[in-house]
Amino acid sequence: MAENCSHDCSSCGEDCPSREGASLKKQPHAMSDIKRVIAVVSGKGGVGKSMTCALLAAASQAKGNVTAVMDADITGPSIPKMFGVHDRARGDEFGIYPCVSKEGVQMMSMNLLLEKEDDPVVWRGALISGTVLQFWTDVIWQGVDYMFVDMPPGTGDVPLTLFQSIPLDGIIVVTTPQDLVGMIVSKAINMAQMMNVPILGIVENMSYLTCPDCGRKISVFGESVVDSIALEHNIPAVAKVPIDRELTLAADAGKIEDVKNNYLSDFFDKVVAELKDKPLAAGNGAKSAKN
Ligand code: ADP
Protein backbone atom coordinates (compact mmCIF):
# COMPACT_ATOMS: atom_id res chain seq x y z
CA MET A 1 0.00 0.00 0.00
CA ALA A 2 1.41 3.41 -0.98
CA GLU A 3 1.98 5.86 1.80
CA ASN A 4 -0.96 8.24 2.40
CA CYS A 5 -3.23 6.21 0.08
CA SER A 6 -6.63 7.92 -0.07
CA HIS A 7 -8.17 5.11 -2.19
CA ASP A 8 -9.13 7.78 -4.69
CA CYS A 9 -7.35 6.29 -7.68
CA SER A 10 -8.20 9.24 -9.92
CA SER A 11 -5.68 11.38 -8.04
CA CYS A 12 -2.62 9.10 -8.25
CA GLY A 13 -0.18 8.06 -10.96
CA GLU A 14 -0.66 5.15 -13.40
CA ASP A 15 2.18 3.23 -11.72
CA CYS A 16 0.84 3.59 -8.16
CA PRO A 17 1.10 0.12 -6.57
CA SER A 18 -2.17 0.62 -4.70
CA ARG A 19 -4.35 1.41 -7.70
CA GLU A 20 -7.57 -0.54 -7.38
CA GLY A 21 -10.08 -2.05 -9.84
CA ALA A 22 -11.64 1.32 -10.58
CA SER A 23 -8.38 2.50 -12.13
CA LEU A 24 -8.82 0.10 -15.06
CA LYS A 25 -11.86 2.07 -16.19
CA LYS A 26 -11.45 4.02 -19.41
CA GLN A 27 -12.69 7.55 -19.83
CA PRO A 28 -15.17 8.19 -22.64
CA HIS A 29 -14.25 10.66 -25.40
CA ALA A 30 -13.82 14.17 -23.97
CA MET A 31 -16.67 15.42 -26.16
CA SER A 32 -19.00 12.58 -25.14
CA ASP A 33 -21.84 13.17 -22.80
CA ILE A 34 -23.19 9.93 -21.32
CA LYS A 35 -25.30 9.49 -18.25
CA ARG A 36 -26.27 5.85 -17.63
CA VAL A 37 -24.56 2.79 -19.12
CA ILE A 38 -26.31 -0.57 -18.91
CA ALA A 39 -24.79 -3.77 -20.29
CA VAL A 40 -27.02 -6.49 -21.71
CA VAL A 41 -25.41 -9.89 -21.15
CA SER A 42 -26.16 -13.56 -21.68
CA GLY A 43 -24.46 -16.80 -20.75
CA LYS A 44 -24.43 -17.98 -24.37
CA GLY A 45 -25.36 -16.83 -27.87
CA GLY A 46 -28.73 -17.11 -29.58
CA VAL A 47 -30.94 -16.45 -26.54
CA GLY A 48 -32.13 -13.02 -27.73
CA LYS A 49 -29.59 -10.69 -26.13
CA SER A 50 -29.48 -8.34 -29.13
CA MET A 51 -33.29 -8.45 -29.39
CA THR A 52 -33.52 -7.46 -25.72
CA CYS A 53 -30.97 -4.70 -26.18
CA ALA A 54 -32.85 -3.36 -29.21
CA LEU A 55 -36.25 -3.47 -27.48
CA LEU A 56 -34.86 -1.70 -24.42
CA ALA A 57 -33.30 1.01 -26.57
CA ALA A 58 -36.52 1.42 -28.56
CA ALA A 59 -38.54 1.67 -25.32
CA SER A 60 -36.13 4.20 -23.82
CA GLN A 61 -36.14 6.38 -26.94
CA ALA A 62 -39.95 6.19 -27.24
CA LYS A 63 -40.20 7.49 -23.67
CA GLY A 64 -38.26 10.63 -24.62
CA ASN A 65 -34.77 9.67 -23.43
CA VAL A 66 -31.73 10.28 -25.60
CA THR A 67 -30.67 6.68 -26.17
CA ALA A 68 -27.61 4.93 -27.56
CA VAL A 69 -26.55 1.37 -28.29
CA MET A 70 -22.94 0.28 -28.32
CA ASP A 71 -22.80 -3.01 -30.20
CA ALA A 72 -19.95 -4.83 -28.48
CA ASP A 73 -20.92 -8.19 -29.96
CA ILE A 74 -18.28 -7.74 -32.66
CA THR A 75 -18.34 -11.19 -34.21
CA GLY A 76 -22.15 -11.23 -34.45
CA PRO A 77 -23.17 -7.58 -34.75
CA SER A 78 -26.91 -7.33 -35.38
CA ILE A 79 -28.01 -4.05 -33.82
CA PRO A 80 -27.80 -1.74 -36.89
CA LYS A 81 -29.72 -4.26 -39.00
CA MET A 82 -32.55 -4.44 -36.44
CA PHE A 83 -32.84 -0.64 -36.56
CA GLY A 84 -32.59 -0.48 -40.36
CA VAL A 85 -29.29 1.43 -40.21
CA HIS A 86 -26.96 0.61 -43.08
CA ASP A 87 -24.83 3.78 -43.27
CA ARG A 88 -21.12 3.87 -42.66
CA ALA A 89 -19.94 5.74 -39.59
CA ARG A 90 -18.31 9.10 -40.24
CA GLY A 91 -15.27 10.53 -38.52
CA ASP A 92 -13.25 13.73 -38.46
CA GLU A 93 -10.22 15.10 -36.61
CA PHE A 94 -12.15 15.05 -33.32
CA GLY A 95 -13.39 11.46 -33.38
CA ILE A 96 -15.98 9.08 -34.79
CA TYR A 97 -19.69 9.89 -34.86
CA PRO A 98 -22.38 7.29 -34.16
CA CYS A 99 -25.00 6.51 -36.80
CA VAL A 100 -28.57 7.39 -35.89
CA SER A 101 -31.78 5.37 -36.35
CA LYS A 102 -35.10 6.61 -37.71
CA GLU A 103 -36.32 7.48 -34.20
CA GLY A 104 -32.98 8.95 -33.11
CA VAL A 105 -31.15 6.08 -31.35
CA GLN A 106 -27.39 6.64 -31.62
CA MET A 107 -25.39 3.51 -32.37
CA MET A 108 -21.92 2.22 -33.09
CA SER A 109 -21.19 -1.24 -34.37
CA MET A 110 -18.49 -3.08 -36.26
CA ASN A 111 -21.01 -3.33 -39.13
CA LEU A 112 -20.98 0.44 -39.49
CA LEU A 113 -17.21 0.43 -40.00
CA LEU A 114 -16.81 -2.52 -42.39
CA GLU A 115 -16.44 -2.03 -46.12
CA LYS A 116 -19.29 -4.52 -46.62
CA GLU A 117 -21.61 -5.07 -43.63
CA ASP A 118 -21.71 -8.83 -44.16
CA ASP A 119 -17.91 -9.19 -44.07
CA PRO A 120 -16.96 -11.66 -41.32
CA VAL A 121 -14.81 -10.46 -38.41
CA VAL A 122 -12.19 -13.13 -37.75
CA TRP A 123 -10.11 -11.51 -35.05
CA ARG A 124 -8.56 -12.69 -31.84
CA GLY A 125 -9.89 -11.58 -28.45
CA ALA A 126 -7.40 -8.80 -27.69
CA LEU A 127 -8.07 -7.06 -31.00
CA ILE A 128 -11.83 -7.38 -30.47
CA SER A 129 -11.77 -5.89 -26.98
CA GLY A 130 -9.43 -3.12 -28.19
CA THR A 131 -11.88 -2.18 -30.93
CA VAL A 132 -14.90 -2.24 -28.63
CA LEU A 133 -13.08 -0.04 -26.15
CA GLN A 134 -12.56 2.45 -28.97
CA PHE A 135 -16.35 2.57 -29.36
CA TRP A 136 -16.23 3.94 -25.81
CA THR A 137 -13.12 6.13 -25.98
CA ASP A 138 -13.13 7.42 -29.58
CA VAL A 139 -16.81 7.79 -30.43
CA ILE A 140 -18.50 11.10 -29.68
CA TRP A 141 -21.78 10.18 -27.99
CA GLN A 142 -24.03 13.19 -27.63
CA GLY A 143 -26.31 13.97 -24.67
CA VAL A 144 -27.02 10.31 -23.92
CA ASP A 145 -29.41 9.53 -21.05
CA TYR A 146 -29.24 5.73 -21.46
CA MET A 147 -26.61 3.75 -23.29
CA PHE A 148 -27.15 0.01 -23.74
CA VAL A 149 -24.11 -2.15 -24.44
CA ASP A 150 -24.85 -5.34 -26.38
CA MET A 151 -22.12 -7.49 -24.81
CA PRO A 152 -20.50 -10.50 -26.46
CA PRO A 153 -22.11 -13.69 -25.08
CA GLY A 154 -20.50 -15.74 -22.32
CA THR A 155 -17.95 -15.00 -19.64
CA GLY A 156 -14.75 -15.10 -21.71
CA ASP A 157 -11.90 -12.70 -22.23
CA VAL A 158 -13.72 -10.01 -24.19
CA PRO A 159 -16.74 -9.53 -21.88
CA LEU A 160 -14.34 -9.60 -18.91
CA THR A 161 -12.18 -6.82 -20.39
CA LEU A 162 -15.27 -4.75 -21.12
CA PHE A 163 -16.62 -5.25 -17.61
CA GLN A 164 -13.31 -4.00 -16.23
CA SER A 165 -12.91 -1.07 -18.60
CA ILE A 166 -16.34 0.50 -19.08
CA PRO A 167 -17.98 2.12 -16.05
CA LEU A 168 -21.33 0.32 -15.90
CA ASP A 169 -24.37 1.39 -13.90
CA GLY A 170 -25.68 -2.14 -14.05
CA ILE A 171 -26.38 -5.16 -16.17
CA ILE A 172 -29.44 -6.91 -17.53
CA VAL A 173 -29.19 -10.67 -17.90
CA VAL A 174 -30.97 -12.35 -20.81
CA THR A 175 -31.78 -16.02 -20.79
CA THR A 176 -34.26 -18.65 -21.94
CA PRO A 177 -36.21 -20.95 -19.56
CA GLN A 178 -33.94 -23.85 -20.51
CA ASP A 179 -30.71 -22.07 -19.59
CA LEU A 180 -32.03 -20.76 -16.33
CA VAL A 181 -32.05 -24.26 -14.95
CA GLY A 182 -28.42 -24.83 -15.89
CA MET A 183 -25.22 -23.20 -14.78
CA ILE A 184 -24.79 -20.84 -17.72
CA VAL A 185 -26.83 -18.02 -16.21
CA SER A 186 -25.29 -18.46 -12.79
CA LYS A 187 -21.89 -17.88 -14.39
CA ALA A 188 -23.01 -14.59 -15.94
CA ILE A 189 -24.57 -13.52 -12.64
CA ASN A 190 -21.46 -14.50 -10.70
CA MET A 191 -19.22 -12.56 -13.08
CA ALA A 192 -21.29 -9.41 -12.58
CA GLN A 193 -21.21 -9.89 -8.82
CA MET A 194 -17.44 -10.42 -8.83
CA MET A 195 -17.04 -7.22 -10.85
CA ASN A 196 -19.26 -5.37 -8.38
CA VAL A 197 -21.77 -4.36 -11.05
CA PRO A 198 -25.40 -4.39 -9.88
CA ILE A 199 -27.79 -6.72 -11.70
CA LEU A 200 -30.76 -4.50 -12.49
CA GLY A 201 -32.98 -7.06 -14.14
CA ILE A 202 -33.38 -10.43 -15.77
CA VAL A 203 -35.24 -11.10 -19.02
CA GLU A 204 -36.54 -14.56 -19.74
CA ASN A 205 -36.77 -14.51 -23.52
CA MET A 206 -38.79 -17.05 -25.50
CA SER A 207 -40.57 -17.62 -22.21
CA TYR A 208 -43.78 -18.89 -23.79
CA LEU A 209 -45.84 -18.91 -26.98
CA THR A 210 -49.43 -17.71 -27.11
CA CYS A 211 -51.65 -20.11 -29.06
CA PRO A 212 -53.14 -18.08 -31.92
CA ASP A 213 -56.40 -20.08 -31.73
CA CYS A 214 -57.22 -20.35 -28.01
CA GLY A 215 -54.85 -17.75 -26.47
CA ARG A 216 -53.38 -20.31 -24.05
CA LYS A 217 -49.74 -19.77 -23.07
CA ILE A 218 -47.55 -22.72 -24.05
CA SER A 219 -44.20 -23.10 -22.27
CA VAL A 220 -42.21 -24.33 -25.26
CA PHE A 221 -38.85 -24.52 -23.47
CA GLY A 222 -40.13 -25.72 -20.09
CA GLU A 223 -41.80 -23.99 -17.18
CA SER A 224 -40.57 -20.54 -16.24
CA VAL A 225 -38.25 -20.38 -13.25
CA VAL A 226 -37.13 -16.78 -13.68
CA ASP A 227 -39.04 -15.48 -10.66
CA SER A 228 -37.31 -17.87 -8.28
CA ILE A 229 -33.87 -17.08 -9.78
CA ALA A 230 -34.56 -13.35 -9.40
CA LEU A 231 -35.57 -13.89 -5.80
CA GLU A 232 -32.51 -16.02 -5.09
CA HIS A 233 -30.12 -13.39 -6.46
CA ASN A 234 -32.07 -10.36 -5.30
CA ILE A 235 -32.64 -9.08 -8.85
CA PRO A 236 -35.25 -6.30 -8.81
CA ALA A 237 -36.78 -6.33 -12.34
CA VAL A 238 -38.10 -9.40 -14.18
CA ALA A 239 -39.61 -9.68 -17.67
CA LYS A 240 -40.98 -12.62 -19.62
CA VAL A 241 -40.89 -12.11 -23.37
CA PRO A 242 -42.84 -14.60 -25.53
CA ILE A 243 -41.78 -16.05 -28.86
CA ASP A 244 -43.49 -13.57 -31.15
CA ARG A 245 -43.23 -13.64 -34.93
CA GLU A 246 -43.78 -9.89 -35.04
CA LEU A 247 -40.44 -9.44 -33.25
CA THR A 248 -38.52 -11.61 -35.72
CA LEU A 249 -40.18 -9.95 -38.71
CA ALA A 250 -39.57 -6.45 -37.35
CA ALA A 251 -35.92 -7.25 -36.54
CA ASP A 252 -35.32 -8.74 -39.98
CA ALA A 253 -36.99 -5.77 -41.70
CA GLY A 254 -34.97 -3.21 -39.69
CA LYS A 255 -38.15 -1.95 -38.01
CA ILE A 256 -37.65 -2.89 -34.38
CA GLU A 257 -38.69 0.63 -33.38
CA ASP A 258 -42.11 0.05 -34.98
CA VAL A 259 -43.18 -3.04 -32.99
CA LYS A 260 -46.67 -2.45 -31.63
CA ASN A 261 -46.12 -4.41 -28.43
CA ASN A 262 -42.76 -3.64 -26.87
CA TYR A 263 -42.70 -6.28 -24.14
CA LEU A 264 -39.89 -4.48 -22.31
CA SER A 265 -41.55 -1.10 -21.92
CA ASP A 266 -42.64 -1.64 -18.27
CA PHE A 267 -39.42 -3.50 -17.51
CA PHE A 268 -37.45 -0.46 -18.69
CA ASP A 269 -39.43 1.72 -16.24
CA LYS A 270 -38.53 -0.65 -13.40
CA VAL A 271 -34.85 -0.46 -14.34
CA VAL A 272 -35.01 3.34 -14.40
CA ALA A 273 -36.69 3.34 -10.98
CA GLU A 274 -33.94 1.08 -9.64
CA LEU A 275 -31.24 3.49 -10.85
CA LYS A 276 -32.94 6.59 -9.52
CA ASP A 277 -30.81 8.43 -6.94
CA LYS A 278 -27.83 6.10 -7.54
CA PRO A 279 -24.54 7.86 -8.40
CA LEU A 280 -23.55 7.85 -12.09
CA ALA A 281 -20.97 5.14 -12.82
CA ALA A 282 -19.43 7.00 -15.75
CA GLY A 283 -19.35 10.22 -13.76
CA ASN A 284 -20.08 12.01 -17.00
CA GLY A 285 -23.77 12.79 -16.80
CA ALA A 286 -25.60 13.93 -19.90
CA LYS A 287 -26.58 17.56 -19.94
CA SER A 288 -30.13 16.44 -20.60
CA ALA A 289 -30.07 14.25 -17.49
CA LYS A 290 -33.55 13.40 -16.31
CA ASN A 291 -32.75 11.67 -13.00
P1 ADP B 1 -28.33 -13.23 -29.37
O1 ADP B 1 -28.01 -11.77 -29.42
O2 ADP B 1 -28.53 -13.74 -27.98
O3 ADP B 1 -27.35 -14.08 -30.14
P2 ADP B 1 -30.57 -12.51 -31.05
O4 ADP B 1 -31.18 -11.38 -30.31
O5 ADP B 1 -29.75 -12.17 -32.26
O6 ADP B 1 -29.75 -13.47 -30.08
O7 ADP B 1 -31.77 -13.49 -31.45
C1 ADP B 1 -31.56 -14.66 -32.23
C2 ADP B 1 -32.70 -14.79 -33.25
O8 ADP B 1 -33.94 -15.03 -32.56
C3 ADP B 1 -32.92 -13.56 -34.09
O9 ADP B 1 -33.28 -13.93 -35.38
C4 ADP B 1 -34.09 -12.83 -33.41
O10 ADP B 1 -34.82 -12.05 -34.32
C5 ADP B 1 -34.90 -14.01 -32.88
N1 ADP B 1 -35.61 -13.72 -31.63
C6 ADP B 1 -35.06 -13.35 -30.46
N2 ADP B 1 -36.01 -13.21 -29.51
C7 ADP B 1 -37.20 -13.51 -30.09
C8 ADP B 1 -38.58 -13.55 -29.63
N3 ADP B 1 -38.87 -13.28 -28.37
N4 ADP B 1 -39.53 -13.90 -30.52
C9 ADP B 1 -39.20 -14.19 -31.80
N5 ADP B 1 -37.95 -14.17 -32.30
C10 ADP B 1 -36.95 -13.84 -31.46
Image: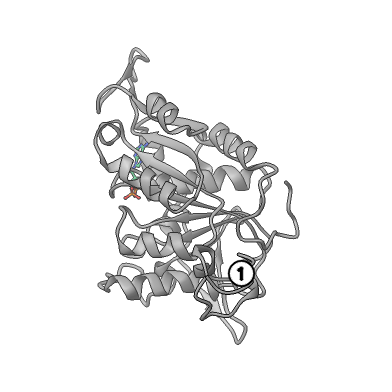
Q: Residue furthest bottom?
A: 93
Q: Quadrant of residue 110?
A: bottom left
Task: Look at 49% across and 43% down and name the residue there.
Answer: 55
Residue under pointer 1: 5
Residue 76 visible from this viewpoint: yes
Seen in the image, is 285 located left or right of residue 255? right
Q: Quadrant of residue 230?
A: top left
Task: Look at 44% across and 36% down and name the residue there.
Answer: 202
Task: Look at 27% across and 73% down and name the residue there.
Answer: 124
Image coordinates for residue 238, horizontal then vertical, percent: 47, 31
The kind of residue on which mark 1 rests is: Cys
Count of number-bearing discs: 1
Residue toward you, 134 or 282: 282
Q: As displayed, is residue 52 above or below residue 263?
A: below
As helix, strand or loop, the secondary structure at mark 1 comes to loop
Task: Look at 53% across and 70% down and name the residue there.
Answer: 26
| Ligand 1 located in image quadrant | top left
Image coordinates for residue 192, horizontal then vertical, percent: 42, 49
Q: Quadrant of residue 116?
A: bottom left
